[in-house]
Each structure stands twice: as structure tokens, then as C-alpha cells.
Amino acid sequence: MNREPYNPQAIEEKWRDFWRSRGFFKAKINDTHKKFYYLNMFPYPSGKLHAGHGRNYILGDAIVRFLLMRGWNVLNPMGWDAFGLPAENAALEQGVHPRDWTWQNIREFKRQFRAWGVEYDWDREIATCEPDYYKWTQWLFLKLYEKGLAYRAKGKVNWCPHCEVVLANEQVIGGRCWRCNSLVEKRELEQWYFKITAYAERLLRDLEKLDWPEHVKKMQENWIGRSEGAEVLFRSENGQEIKVFTTRPDTLWGATFLVIAPEHPLVERLTSPAKRQEVQAYREITERLSEVERTSAEKEKTGVFLGTYAINPANGERIPIWIADYVLFGYGTGAVMGVPAHDERDFLFALKYGLPVIPVIAHPAAVAKALIPAGAYRKEILPALQTQGIEVEEKEGALLLRFSVEKQQTVEALIQQHLRPEGWAAIVGQGWRIVFQEEVVNVGSQAEERRALAMIKERDQAQRPKKTIAEVLWAEAFLRDLLFHADYGTMINCGPLSGTAGSAAVARTVEWLERQGIGKSAVTYKLRDWLISRQRYWGAPIPIIHCPRCGIVPVPEKDLPVRLPEVRRIGKLGLADIPEFIPTTCPRCGGVAQRDTDTMDTFVDSSWYFLRYISPKDEERPFDSDLVNRWLPVDLYVGGVEHAILHLLYSRFITKFLFDLGLLTFDEPFKKLFTQGMVTYPAYWCPNHHWIPPKEVSPGTRCPRCGAELVVSVVAMSKSKKNVVSPDELIAQYGADTERLYTLFMGPPEKEIEWSEEGVRGCWRFLNRFWNTALTIIARTGECQEQPVPESFGPKEQALWVKLQATVKKVTEEFEGRLALNTAVAALMEFTNELSSYAEDPAADPKLLRWALRNLILLLSPFTPFICEELWHRLGEEKAVLETPWPTYDPRVLEEAEVEIPIQINGKVRVKLRFPRAKAADPKALEALVLAAPEVKQRLQGLRIEKVIAVPEKLVSIVAR
RNA sequence: GCCGAGGUGGCGGAAUAGGCAGACGCGCGGGACUCAAAAUCCCGUGCCCCGGAAGGGGCGUGUGGGUUCGACUCCCACCCUCGGCACCA
């Protein structure tokens, strides 16, 4: 038969405007009876879309088409996160206005969406760079300011030298700029912040009620970083109060020094005159270090003694005060107590600077060790230890002992008994004990530590240079693993609290601190306030006026928006480079004043856009609260994981703030979140010509220009690495449906996956088969309009009928559940294959053929809408696909279908039998049927049946010997 | 280092309230069509062994143990990969 070939270019174009002109994607905004707010993260319009971007939009479009056919009133808007650096950089480099550059890209994006068949409710389009939008971003700022949640502060901020702009903490990834990967520096600047920390607890707690991927919630949880502990008040000898945060108040008795951050304001008052110069020098060095250099864990700890002392409030001991760069000013109170016996960093610091180590938590391991230096003991000790069953190792004359803690007293007594007068020995176990012939010194306080050290030095020349007992013990590698630990355990050397069990240690210490009035329980977060000032042009101007008389004055709401000045040329300093923008009059006193020249972080723009879609053109207010409260929270939000912290945390914060203002009745913006994975593709790097497009490389892996061997890496598609696959080319070659189908079929949508040319061809072949099968069926069943009659089915018809029900079930469930659409596509391919072979039978039932095809077209239409719409109309349907209800299935057909039951004999599948489902559902009946089956009887010949396990509808397992 | 996800054919991946491992697709092999190739269509395809064939047997989900009639799935220990955080007191 000479059939019309599948020609996507011819059919696709005709449907592109059909859906739009019919208004299928327009939400009925006032009818929220059966509403569904589906939202894709809006893009930053830069350049062109590539096949990797399709992962997000094609998935969304398929879901929305499904929902529409299911009868939902879907709100599915799209807009533009249109402020940002690339536009401004393009402006600086090419002299184009950022707005023109941005809108040029937006037009391109919209053209590509249309080509893909990805449709939105374009009446609701928004762009954050337009005054009618950023007016309300500024309004949001004013509201935050009014509530004391927007404030200006001087401080060390992250500065990207390449972008010449400050960055929020969330925008520094591993010490580098999130956009350009430059090393971030620290600068002291006065900047605007949003007080997101005021919402830390709620942002953490409410994660629980979100239907989000667990790993995203975990990331936010870690980012917020809640720590429970206590604040303890130390007092310096010159009367300064030093507040310290610790998660381990139970180790307070072991605090032998204090360390405060070099930038801590108390440093001035705590430095002794003699140390002033050294301290100043150290502070300057620290200041110059980048965040990465300073916080690299490998970096050796450094610090400087301030020359003054504080008192440990638990035991009254004098402890030195240090500054060190491992203590961060921005976390906790910027000061820590040094407990070297139970904190690794403190231990290394103490060892380096000769600060005493006092163990105050018993070692959780039930072993103890002892060191008896060479010449310190009489040799009768050896048999004595052996009778006690103590493990002894002799090393260069010294004895190294290992024993369980219960034997500690026995061992101690034995050692003491056999020690020479000038000898000494050390036992480390539950605590540290130094043994001499005349006494045993427990290292439980600084005084004891000093005394023990002095006594050792008196006896042992070699130990004279040592500064602490810890140093003496550390010298013997055998003892090291017991010298420091950070576990919970019984408190020792802790005065009134000694003996407290590890499980109660923290609570009891906090209680004790509160009773003594020197501390209280406290919670700290890693989350810092959100720095939102940007020294740029292409952003929403901060609506603030600086008046020499009135100080900081907010721009009155009626004067919003503060418009971006229209200028020809944009300078490197952003708004600060535009002299005519700055002067204004003070709204309070009417005098001469100056505008704030910072713009807001673009993440402020995107922290509320999902609200604006509801009433995008409202000139009176940012959003229509009444409608917003009916439509939100967003039912399903889809976007990339890269926003797991940044955008998603900021949006949650702003939503909670607007909730507190009484403008919203919900306090979480996104009920369900789905994060799609990136699409990767090989990228080729030439040492001479940088990134080479894959197309120019093949065959081989050499540079087409210089022949150099290329470095290949499979990485996310990106324009900068030139490894993008162009949708325009794919559509020209295979059509949009093929690209859509492959995008949804290539793997689970949440996983990162490599784009495959061969995979695309597979989908192209499938659509050809589908097309041919459909045309065959349409030709054969032209006149027939009746529904199939199951009563008339033969076995082949029945099998196809059952398969159809199963396919409808599978596809529907994937859309409504886990969104593993790759498996839905697989099911549709299976069904197409079966339908296609059934259609070859000249005796095939035309009613069934037609019905099966009709359903297949509907099921496939969210994936490949063009070919389906075309075939749908060729089938003679009057309405559009999107006006037709989604197919349903009859569960009874599936229930009544025959099932195949595998029969295991001694763990191996030996026979497979088919039974009606009703029979297989009853374990007793199933067992009887199986044992009666001749194939099974034959297998069991000569064997004695020991056990039969019949699992209804699944399998039968027979154990026989 | 800590937290999280994950290791299944030549490849992308199916199958987890414990029940036929490898759906679907790619690739590969064979065949048809063609002067030929491409495209398309049909058949086969986890690995190994016995057999001329029909057929039969063994091994297989990162490694080693365990629970069970039965383990990709549960438990213990370990190895590797990816992602996030990382001197956070």
C-alpha cells in the first residue's frame, strides 16, 4: 500500500496557532472550584533555549495537557526573570540597552516555546524588569523596612571582583561566585539586608509540611543549620563580659582558654598593651585572607594571645583569651570556649600553643592505656603485669600497656609499686593520671596539670622542653587515640556534676548554668541575613532616600516606582555612575537629598512573582489577595535543583512575611515541588581553541583547527561550553514531537542524563510506526463509529482489550503520581506494538481497532500533541483533543483477566501456568490447581512435598525433597 | 569529615508493602527489499556450558556475610560514583 509518509514539518505548523487561538491554555481565573496552579520556574532570558532546557518546559506542557483533559481549570503562566548581570554585561560590551537585549531574547524564547508546542496563558506574562512589576518589588522592600526586616548595616561582605558586585551568602558556592566562578573577596561595606534570620525557625519547621523531594528539604535544613546548645557568660579579669555559644555545655569544666574571632569588637578592650601590636598585625592578615583561604579545613590553625585572662565560671580557673581565625565572627556569638580534650580544632590549637588539656568526659571506649618510659620501672613489673593478664608491648625499653578500664586501679597500683623513685608513668583511660612512686596525680584541673608536669620534668630530662602534659603524652603515638574525643560520656573532673551520665550531661549542665546565673540554653543558626544590595544598573532601584538632616527616609508608596533612569550609556558602577539619578528632595523635610544607588538582588524579584500572575496588570496593589488566596499555594512547581536553596528559600521567606502582614492566608508558596535533572552532552576542550562544538569534532577527538588532542567531558549542556543541541535543528530534522517524546522518554525526569542522538532516532522511528498504524486503521475503519462489544471478543481481541485498560491505568497513574513519564512512554510503545500487530490481522474487529486507536491518540497527546491532533481530526473527530476527556479504564476487565502464575520448585521457576484471576486470588484454590497440573506433577515425581506457599495472584513456591 | 542520592546487559534504563530480573528504547547479529547503499520492515540478542537440532543445565542486580520457601528489594560490614555542606563551636 502506498501510504502517505509521516511528515512532521507539514503537520506541526498548522496546529501551533490552533491551540492558542482556541484559548485552551487560558485559566478561568474567577472559577477556583477545580483549580490547579501549575508553575514552571520562570527563566532568565539569555540567548536561546537548548534541548536541555526542554526537560523543564516539555515536562510541564505534558502535565498541563493531561490536567486539562482531566477537566482541571489549570493556571499555567510564564514570565521572565528579566533583571540581571548578563543583560548589563552585554550592554557594557556591545552598547545595547539591557532592555532591548532582554526583550530580544524574550522574543526568541517565545518563538521556541511555540515551536515546541509548549503553551502558556500568555495574557498573564510578566517581566520583572518592567516598571509595573518592579514598582511592587520596591513596595515589598518598603513593607520589609516598615517592619524592621530591611536594614542597612556595615560589615564584611562577599565581593566578586569579576562581576564587581556584592553577593549574598547563598550566592557564594565553595568560596566562588555562583555566576562567574571567580574567587570571592571580603570587603567592608555598608549594605542593605533582609532579616531572613528572624524566620529561621519557621523556615526550618515548616519544611515538614511540604511535599518536596527529601534531598531538597535536607539541603535547606542544612543551610539553615540549627544547633541547640547553651550560651555561657565568661568574665575577663578586667571586667568584660564575653558571651560564648557552645553545643557542648557539658564540657565547660574542660575549657582552658577562650578564642574570639579577630574581628570581634571586644578584641580592643581585651588586648593588653604589650600585645597590641602583635594583635593588630594578626587582625590585618586575617582580613586580607579570602573566605576560602581562611576556612579551608587543611589550613593550620593560627592565633594570637591577647595577654589577658578570663575566669572559667564553672571552676573559677584563670584561662587565657586568644583570637584565632578559625572562629567566625558571623556565627553564634563570635566567641568560643576552648575545650581541647573534646574538640578536635581546640585540641590542635592547644597542642600548637602549649595550652593545657584537661579531660572532662570519660572516653566511651572501655579501654585504657599506660606508658611507662624506659628506665622508669623495675623489671619485676613484667611478671606482675602478666599474672594480671595485661597486654604489654616493649618498645625501646618503654612499656606500652593496654587493658580494660575495670583493671585501671589494679594496673595503677602495680605500676606505682614497681616504679623507680625517679620514674614516672602515665595512664590514659577514663581520665589522665600521672603515676609517681610517692603519689598519683589526676589531671583534673590546671593546677594538677602544672604540678604533674613539673614533677615529670624534675625526674625526666627529656621532658623539659614540653609545655603541657598533652604534649608529653602526644609524643607517644600509642596513646594518641585516647587523648581526644568528641563523644558524649560520663562527666569527670566536673565538680558537682562529676559522674553525670553522658545521656543527661547536656541537660543537667544547662540546668546548673541557669541556676548559677552564668548561662542559659540557646539555639543558633548557620543562616545569615540576606544581603540584597547590588551596585548595578539593571535591577530594581532600592526605594530609599538619604537626607543629610533626616537620615534614611523611605520613598513614599505614592511615589513608586523609583524608575531606572533612561540613559544611553551604562557605566561600571551602575546607578552610581548616573549623576542625574542621585539628587532628589527629601520627602520628609523637603530639603536636598540623595537617592540610594543600589539595586536589589534579582532574587528579590523572583521571590514573589508567583503571586503576580494572578492579577498581572493590577495597578493598585502587588496582587489581588482574595484571588491569590484561592489559587495558591502553587499545586505543582517544577524547576532545576540548582535553586534548591537560593530561590526556594527566599520565596518561602517572603511568603511567610506577607502572611504575617495578613495579605496571604497560606505561609508556604509551593505545596509540591519537582526538580528535573540536567541534560548532559560531551564537551570538547582544545588547549589552543578552547571549547569546540561536538559537531565539528567527529570523527575522532582531535581539534578540527589545530589537530590537538581534545579533552572530553560529559557535562550539562551550556552555551559557554558549546555543547548544546539546538531544538531548531532537531525540529527541522525530526519535528517537535520527536524531540518532545525523546525528552520525556530518555530517563526518569528527576535524574541527570546524557542526550543521545540514537535515542532521538528511536523515537522518530516509533512515531513513524504509530503514524503508519494509525493511517492503516483509519483507512480500514472509515465508516465505523460504534463502540466495541466485549461480549463478541475472541482471545486476541480480549488480550488487546485488557492491554488497553492496563495502559490507560499506567499512564494515568504516572501523571498523577511520581511523574516517571519515561515508563508511561514505554507502556504506550508496548500498546502501539500490540495494536500494530493486531491491525495486520485481516479479521480484526474494526470497532475495537478504531476504539483502541482513539484511546491511544488521546493517551499519547500530552507527549506528542501535533501528530495526535492531526490523526485525531483524520479520525473524523470534531472537537479538539484538549476538549476531549482523558480515557478511563474499566478495573473489572483487569480484575477478570487471566494471570500467569510462575511455579517455583525449590526456589527455581520451573513451570508457568495461566489461571483466571478469581481462582488465582484464593491461595487454597490456587494451591490445589497448581498441584493438580500435569506439568507440575511431572516435575515433582519422586519428590516429597514439604511445603507449599501460594501467594495470591503472584506465584506458587513448592519445597520438595 | 558530615549529610543525602545511587551502583542492574555493550549503552539509557524497567521491576522495591520480599514473589517470573533485564519492560521499553538504543546498539549489535542475521534476514527481506535494493544493482548497491541509506531508509524501512521481520527475526534474534544477559553471561557461560552441553546438544546437530528440539531442548537442557549453571551463573547472574558493586563486594562479603545474614534473615527467608523465596532478596535488585530487608539487616550487618565494606568498596566505589555523584550531589550538597564543610574550622558552624
Image: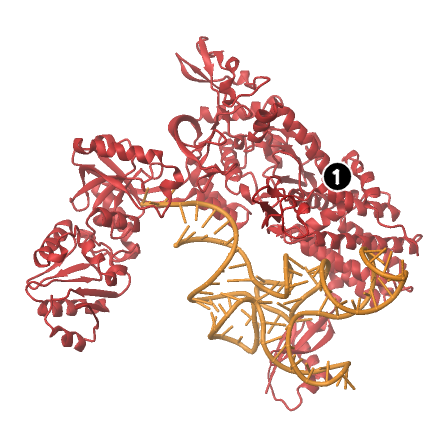
Q: Colour of chain A?
A: red
User: Type of residue at label 1?
Assistant: Ala
- Give the residue furthest to the bottom: A942
Q: Quadrant of the N terminus of chain A?
A: bottom right
Q: Which residue is mark 1?
A: A115
Q: Colour of chain B?
A: orange
In this view, A567 is above or below A793: above
Residue A767 horizontal side relative to residue A426, left or right: right
Residue B60 horizontal side relative to residue A325, left or right: right
Looking at this view, is A623 or A546 the one in front? Answer: A546
Position of residue A24 measured from the top left corner of the image (x, y, whole percent): 76, 38
Position of residue A239 measured from the top left corner of the image (x, y, whole percent): 18, 33
**Residue A727 is drawn in which quadrant?**
top right
Evaluate whether residue A835 shows in this view: yes
Q: Which residue shows up at 25% across the image and 66% down it?
A: A367
Looking at this view, is A284 or A371 the one in front? Answer: A284
Position of residue A599 measured from the top left corner of the image (x, y, whole percent): 51, 24
Evaluate whether residue A28 shows in this view: no
In this view, A51 is above or below A657: below
Residue A762 horizontal side relative to residue A450, left or right: right
Looking at this view, is A231 or A685 the one in front? Answer: A685
Q: Residues within 10 Å of mark 1 (few under 14, many from 20)?
A: some
Q: Which residue shows up at 83% across the image and 43% down it?
A: A11
In this view, A661 is above or below A723: above
Residue at disc 1, secondary structure: helix
Q: Chain of mark 1?
A: A
Residue A347 horizontal side relative to residue A151, left or right: left
**Residue A406 is drawn in which quadrant?**
bottom left
- Give the residue furthest to the top: A591
In this view, A241 is above or below A140: below
